Amino acid sequence: MIASGLRSPRRASTSGGGTGSRFHTHMKAIVVGEFGAPDVMKLSDVAARSPGAGEVSIVVRAVGVNPVDTYIRSGAHAIRPQLPYVPGTDAAGDVESVGAGVTAFKRGDRVYVFAPNAGTYAERVVCAADHAHPLPAHATFAQGAALGVPYATAYRALFQRAGARPGETVLIHGATGGVGIAAVELAHARGLTVIGTGGTDRGLQAARDHGADVVVNHRAENYVDEIRQATGGRGVDLIVEMLANVNLDRDLGLIAKHGRVMVVGNRGRIEINPRDAMSRDATILGMTLFNATLADLREIHAALVAGLADGTLRPVIGREMPLAEAAGAHEAVLQPGAYGKIVLTP
């Protein structure tokens, strides 16, 4: 699915529920011609294509920007798409047409897309129908674009990898960004006691508004003591860690016996004392969303669609930027003081 926006155009299909509407042979998209800094991304005219069997074509209304997009663009990620390519995994928009065999969607349906490396930084995206999911009328397109990577990551981290259970206490380190707020909402809805950290008053208020029972400013000198006090000195059962290279050593001193540290994000090396894990029978877990199986993803998106429909999940949009400013979005998404989700609008 790499660089889908750069494939050769085909004639529009009206089979399998296709609409027969005028097909656009070209579109605007962000193209990466070489790995490097954000300015390697250029807004360009590229060939569009109609959906094949089992695929849907979507008019993109909002695009989710994720830190992993920046790692792939820089060439630092294990995934290295063939150049040139159109970045992006997350989007939301309207179904424009469907390919043969697609019965789940029709023209005009509102959907969100989670399609790894499908090229969502574009005016249109074609993806497998299984990678599109219903977007309720009360949710904005920006909120739909904020779902895929952040909420799927949070769900997989909490429930599929760390086995979070009702009644446990979870510390979400970095609870104010896209993944953090998703983790707060999902953990709160499942009956966990949620402690969230952040670096700004605005972000901490958002975490509180979305279900955190306790919020702590991780820039405060004594923030670790505040977390211990919040658990009565027992420690937390689970930590969802967004920046392990800064926090992992301290995390091992904050978990209760038989606790787990779930590493979701990391940007470098760190030295730890293994005895802190040994004395607690603790577990350090790692994950990447790209390792999720098809069964994992079906479970994840069934939960997300239900949570979005009933109002349990309410993605926070911190900033909307034009598609042409993708380079600026890639710089902003890595800045400290994260608040909600950054989305691009074609």
Image (tube, grey):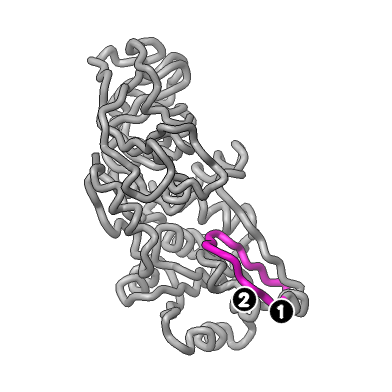
Three-letter amino acid code at disc 1?
Asp
Three-letter amino acid code at disc 2?
Asp
Q: Is residue 284 above or below residue 41?
A: below
Classify residue 132 by image quadrant: top left
User: Marks 1 and 2, how far apart in space?
Assistant: 9 Å
Other residues around mark 1 within 10 Å, as few (<14) / some (14–19) / many (≥20):
some
Q: In this view, does 22 lie above or below 58?
A: above
Secondary structure of the residue carrying tag 1 is helix
Q: Which residue was labeled with disc 1?
A: 276
Q: Which region is colored magenta? A: 257-273
> Can residue 197 be seen?
yes
Pick the residue in front: 323 or 80: 80
Classify residue 319 by image quadrant: bottom left
- Please give left or right for residue 340 compared with residue 61 in the image: right
| Residue visible at 41% across and 33% down in the picture | 85
Classify residue 206 by image quadrant: bottom left
Pick the residue in front: 9 or 184: 9
Residue 262 among magenta residues: yes
> Residue 345 location, x and y as percent?
25, 43
> Residue 90 location, x and y as percent?
40, 42
Other residues around mark 2 within 10 Å, as few (<14) / some (14–19) / many (≥20):
some
Contact check, label 1 and label 2, Cβ < 8 Å:
yes
| Residue visible at 42% across and 85% down in the picture | 220
> Residue 291 location, x and y as percent?
61, 44
Q: Which residue was labeled with disc 2?
A: 249
> Can residue 93 be seen?
no
> Residue 141 location, x and y as percent?
29, 43
The C terminus is located in which quarter? Answer: top left
